[in-house]
Amino acid sequence: MKWTSPDDSLRRWALGRRTLLKTALSASVITPITSLSMQFGAAGTASLTKEQRDRMTPSQIVEELKKGNERFRAGKMVARDYVAQKRSTAAGQFPAAVVLGCVDSRAPAEIIFDAGIGDTFNARIAGNVVNDDLLGSMEFACAVAGAKVVLVFGHTACGAVKGAIDDVEMGNLTGLLARIKPAITATKFDGDKSSKNAAYVDAVARANVVLGVDNIRRRSPILEDLEKKGSVQTVGAMYDLATGMVEFVV
Ligand SMILES: [Zn+2]
């Protein structure tokens, strides 16, 4: 089956029953769109609606991610009612972004960006590397479900990056770490190039993010096309485990 139309069955599946219900009951459904701003976390009980997501540009979504990180760093996160958000998203989801992050327990994107249930797609893999299955997931998120930002989300002191620097070989990890090796080659660094040197590890992680963004553009004609049209923006950021700061690097 080839998905070429936004009206195909997968898109309907992604949008879920909410759209169908809205169409059928449009006169009687009360949607508090006008009372909410378009930002993430505008209300702790609601998640992004289709209307809110669709009227944001990719750049505005990146700005909302930055604001969410500021709230996180300041300890002023939105008070969320996850039970209410679970209820409001059960029939459909309209996430604004898809994040490709690391499995590291200290780098949970939803918390770091102060986003709620239904606001972002999240893919996590050691070293936030790109592979075909993840590209497929990101294509689904954007081309089918309507997300507008693809974010490659690396972090400081990444164990996977250290493992790649150390040429660790272990089971299935060997092949995964091989995907980080091009970032080692691409990193220009004066000084101790070992996994003991935090600055070097972070420089490689940063190069890995830049190459990740490049990889997505080169290997996904679908996402590249959406980006050329201006409906999707692919960006990369580094998260500092110590300060909580997210720095957009590409
Ligand atoms: Zn990591």
Image: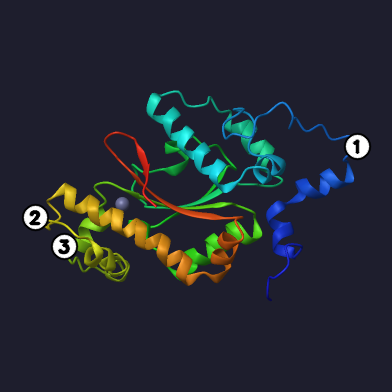
Q: Quick check: 165 left or right of 124?
A: left
Q: Furthest residue to the bottom?
A: 1
Q: Secondary structure at mark 1?
A: loop
21 left or right of 246? right
Q: Position of residue 243 (x, y in %)?
A: 29, 33
Label at residue 12: none
Q: CA distance from mark 1 to mark 3?
A: 62 Å
Q: Are marks 1 and 2 in contact (CB under 8 Å)?
A: no
User: Which residue, as the protein is rendered here, is positioned at the far right?
Assistant: 27
Residue that carries the numbered disc 3 in the rendered image: 166
Closest to the observer: 236 or 6? Answer: 236
User: With 196 as the anchor, is 248 left or right in this view?
Assistant: right
| Label located before the other in sequence (1 or 3) | 1
From the top left corner, tell me how far across and down residue 55 is, in percent.
68, 43
Disc 3 residue type?
Asp
Disc nearer the start of the sequence (2/3): 3
Residue 121 % position (x, y): 54, 50
Most foreground residue, 84 or 46: 46
The residue at the point 37 percent across, 57 percent down is: 128
Q: Which mark is residue 27?
A: 1
Element class at badge 3: loop
What is the C-alpha distance between the residues marked 1 and 2?
Answer: 67 Å
Q: How is the image coloured?
A: rainbow
Q: What residue does disc 2 label?
A: 192
Question: How far, Cα to Cα, is label 2 from label 3?
Answer: 13 Å
